[in-house]
Amino acid sequence: MPASLLMIAATFLFATMGVCVKLASELYDAGEIVMYRGLVGMAMLGTLCLVRGQTLRTAVPAMHFWRSLSGVISLSLWFYAIGKLPLATAMTLNYMSSVWMALFLMGGAVIMGSARIDGRLVAAVLLGFAGVALVLRPTIDQQQAWHGLAGLLSGMLAALAYLQVTALGRAGEPEYRIVFYFSVGGVTAGALSTLALRLSEQGSPHGHTLKGIALLLAVGLLATIAQLLMTRAYGQGKTLVNACLQYLGIVFSFVYGVALFRDPVTGWALGGMALIITAGLAATLLRASTTPKDSQQHSTTEP
């Protein structure tokens, strides 16, 4: 299958996963959803490794720990935002990761004493945050402000996770092993947060229903399959084409939100999404032009 079709399928599956997360958030806490998403991912990737005769043994466990820590916190915040905000808004804020990476690149240049900061990167970052202001404008009230901040932080931590994925790739770690240990981190963190929450409330974990089980399985299956498809697409296709197609996830989420959840359609939000997409694409293009080709590592929209 062509890389472009793989990318379109992956973004559609990620958007569909967002729908399942939003529905599951009515029955489970974000930590529980992260935990079960990780369980499904572990089972699928563990089975895949067994069938292919691959090994999960790693020489860099500490690197996997830090990548999983930032990625799992980002995923938890993202799932929380999906449950509280319009679907397309939560998805768009997470897609700010490319803009955050541009900001980190600028910060690294300052720390290293670079005399020149790329003005185009500065413009991309400012454009991205202008888009955030427009996206959140319809929902800025005392209660929604935290939900928006959670979504924004999820994108920032996702950018950190992507940088750690790059480091793991340079260390020789294959994608399946990175994703497997990320799933392990999700199970561990989700279980601990769920336990702490239940102890504080002196209650028990949420009971399961057929609907709840189906939604949790769907979240794990859709996320894992989408990750594999997107990984293959980046391996086969052109970086900029894949980056452009990846933003179809926002379009799919917008359609889902309006059709299934009756999310409001406002000019401010649409304009903000357009600015964030433009900023993200610009940051991706500029980053690709300044990063050696053999050191580039691409991840998925999921942290």
Image (cartoon, rainbow, N blue to C red):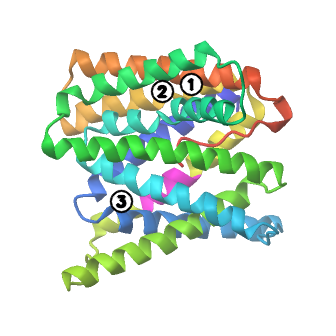
Which SS class for mark 1? helix
Which SS class for mark 2? helix
Give how far across and how far down residue 289 sits, in percent: 74, 20
Would you name the residue on which mark 3 appears? 215
Q: Determine whether 159 is above or below 182 in the image.
A: above
Task: Tell me how many marks there are.
Answer: 3
Asked whether residue 218 is drawn in magenta, I would say yes
Task: Give the mark, 3 or 1, whose residue is nearer the N terminus.
Answer: 3
Q: Which disc is residue 245 wearing?
A: 1
Which SS class for mark 3? helix
Q: Are marks 1 and 2 in contact (CB under 8 Å)?
A: yes
Q: Is residue 211 left or right of residue 114?
A: left
Q: Determine whether 8 is above or below 45 in the image.
A: above
Q: Depth check: 166 or 257 in front?
A: 166
Q: Quadrant of residue 107?
A: top right
Q: Quadrant of the N terminus?
A: top right
Q: Quadrant of residue 41?
A: bottom right
Q: Depth check: 260 or 249 in front?
A: 249
Instruction: Check disc 1: other Cα within 10 Å, few if <14, some if 14-19, many if 20+.
Output: some
Q: Amino acid at mark 2?
A: Leu
Would you name the residue on which mark 2 appears? 248
